[in-house]
Image: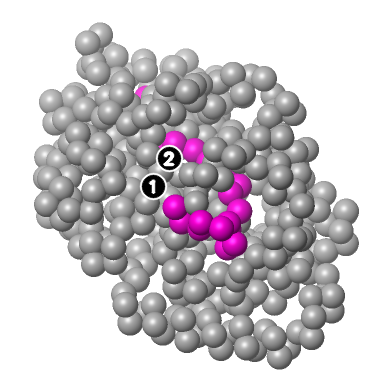
């Protein structure tokens, strides 16, 4: 998945909606790029060897968790933590946090595969988490040091068992759904009253996509996600691993390519809020934030988020500890801190993504818990499908096709 801050124009270059000098006094680096990391069998083997060396070095350099320096290095998606959270953790524990951000899972994977072992906490999406876990990139968690695991929503825990059956390598943080975000004012003006707003056809049927070219269509800048969205648009099984189905998805994407304004997992939120695009494949929380930004800016149009009737991808962001982390004990403390009901509620109230901590629900603003775009009703949840990892060979082909698609070839 790719995500990036919503920000006023003068702040967009910094990559943060928070005034860095006054609101974010932590060491705060922005990594703003969308790269495509492709795992190969040889890279997996090489990475396992590198991870083994990193673990050995960590053992040699650290006699015991109790001897750790009171520091922690967190690497998370942009806009994926509530302001004040890091400061609260530091005040309670005395552990100083260096907090860096990225905007795509591919950026994180590239860093992990390069053998970066200075991170103590990372937050991959569940489908990337599965591949990275298989490659031996994560340390096994000491579950006895996570008493707040009891606060987790059993439904979410069961969902991610497909990637981590015993819950030994990752802990769910927040989750969301990929659907369609519209500027209803502009879309209705161009597509008319009979426009199928509750269907992927609005994007993936050339008949409707052509009508929206003049006001702007945005697709996610991620090959795997965009092809899965196209599978929904083609009415195919989103869990398929059949290359023929992905060829159908590619044909769908090629048919609408002339009408696509941009591939973005960063600026599309600000573009929605500013009226620069009228239809976007969007993450649920991002769509809500764009809506709030548009309202704050006094925009006169309506923004809405829709879970298409054909179904939609669901994803879960996971806390994980890199195998070479030098501060695993501090990392465990941070994860358990984030699993507290009060801390978890802070996150959802601010970043507008549902928490995986059911114990936090009573502390969340009712306007948020009652918003079906953030906490979908049961009938909508029946239509979502957890994003799953694809075979390496298939991902390689998808990435090649996606780059060709973006280039218009």
Mark pair 1, 2: CA separation: 6 Å
In what element is the residue under mark 2? Answer: strand
Q: Are discs 1 and 2 less than 8 Å apart at CB?
A: yes
* Residue 169 visible from this viewpoint: yes
Q: Residue furthest top?
A: 193
Q: Quadrant of residue 364?
A: top right
304 vs 335, left or right, is: left
| Residue in the image at 70% along x and 77% along y | 326
Q: Looking at the rendering, in which quadrant would you find the C terminus?
A: bottom left
Residue at the front extreme of this rendering: 166
The range drawn in magenta is 162-182
**169 sits left or right of 386 in the view:** right
Question: For mark 1, does the 10 Å Cα neighbourhood hold few (<14), some (14 to 19), or many (20 or more) residues?
Answer: many
x, y percentage for residue 122?
59, 61
Residue linked to disc 1: 387
Q: 10 Å neighbourhood of mark 2: few (<14), some, or many (≥20)?
A: many
**Which residue matches tag 2?**
314
- Between 381 and 407, the one lying in front of the other is 381
- The residue sitting at 36% across, 15% down in the picture is 185
- Please check the rendered image and state whether residue 180 is part of the magenta-colored stretch, yes or no: yes
Vertical side of 78 occupied by 320: above or below: below
- Give the vertical position of 339 relative to 407 (above or below): above
**157 part of magenta stretch:** no
Q: Position of residue 159 (x, y in %)?
A: 48, 44
Q: How far across and how far down the image is residue 358, in percent?
A: 66, 35
Which residue occupies 52% across, 44% down? 158
């Amino acid at each position: 998945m790719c995500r990036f801050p919503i920000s006023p124009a003068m702040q967009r270059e910094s990559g943060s909606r928070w005034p860095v000098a006054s609101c974010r006094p932590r060491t705060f680096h922005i990594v703003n790029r969308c790269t495509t990391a492709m795992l190969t069998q040889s890279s997996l083997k090489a990475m396992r060897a590198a991870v083994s060396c990193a673990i050995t070095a960590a053992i040699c350099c650290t006699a015991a968790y109790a001897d750790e320096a009171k520091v922690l290095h967190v690497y998370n998606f942009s806009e994926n933590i509530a302001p004040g959270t890091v400061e609260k953790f530091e005040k309670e524990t005395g552990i100083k946090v260096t907090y860096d951000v990225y905007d795509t899972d591919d950026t994180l994977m590239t860093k992990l595969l390069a053998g970066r072992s200075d991170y103590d906490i990372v937050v991959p999406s569940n489908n990337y988490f599965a591949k990275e876990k298989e490659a031996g990139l994560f340390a096994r968690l000491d579950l006895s040091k996570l008493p707040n695991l009891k606060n987790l929503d059993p439904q979410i825990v069961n969902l991610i068992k497909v990637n981590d059956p015993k819950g030994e390598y990752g802990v769910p943080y927040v989750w969301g759904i990929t659907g369609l975000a519209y500027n209803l004012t502009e879309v209705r003006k161009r597509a008319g009253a009979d426009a199928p707003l509750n269907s992927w056809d609005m994007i993936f049927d050339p008949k409707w996509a052509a009508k929206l070219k003049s006001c702007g269509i945005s697709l996610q800048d991620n090959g795997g996600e965009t092809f899965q969205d196209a599978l929904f648009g083609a009415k195919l099984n989103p869990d398929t691993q059949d290359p023929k189905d992905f060829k159908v998805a590619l044909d769908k994407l090629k048919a609408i390519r002339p009408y696509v304004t941009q591939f973005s997992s960063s600026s599309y939120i600000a573009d929605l809020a500013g009226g620069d695009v009228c239809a976007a494949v969007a993450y649920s929380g991002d769509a809500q934030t764009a809506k709030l930004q548009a309202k704050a800016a006094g925009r006169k149009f309506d923004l809405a988020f829709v879970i298409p009737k054909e179904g939609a991808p669901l994803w879960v962001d996971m806390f994980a500890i890199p195998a070479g982390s030098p501060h695993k004990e501090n990392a465990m403390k941070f994860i358990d801190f984030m699993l507290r009901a009060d801390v978890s509620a802070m996150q959802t109230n601010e970043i507008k993504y549902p928490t995986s901590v059911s114990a936090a629900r009573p502390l969340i603003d009712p306007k948020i818990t009652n918003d079906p775009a953030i906490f979908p009703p049961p009938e909508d949840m029946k239509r979502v499908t957890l994003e799953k990892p694809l075979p390496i060979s298939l991902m390689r082909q998808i990435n090649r096709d996606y780059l060709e698609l973006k280039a218009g070839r």
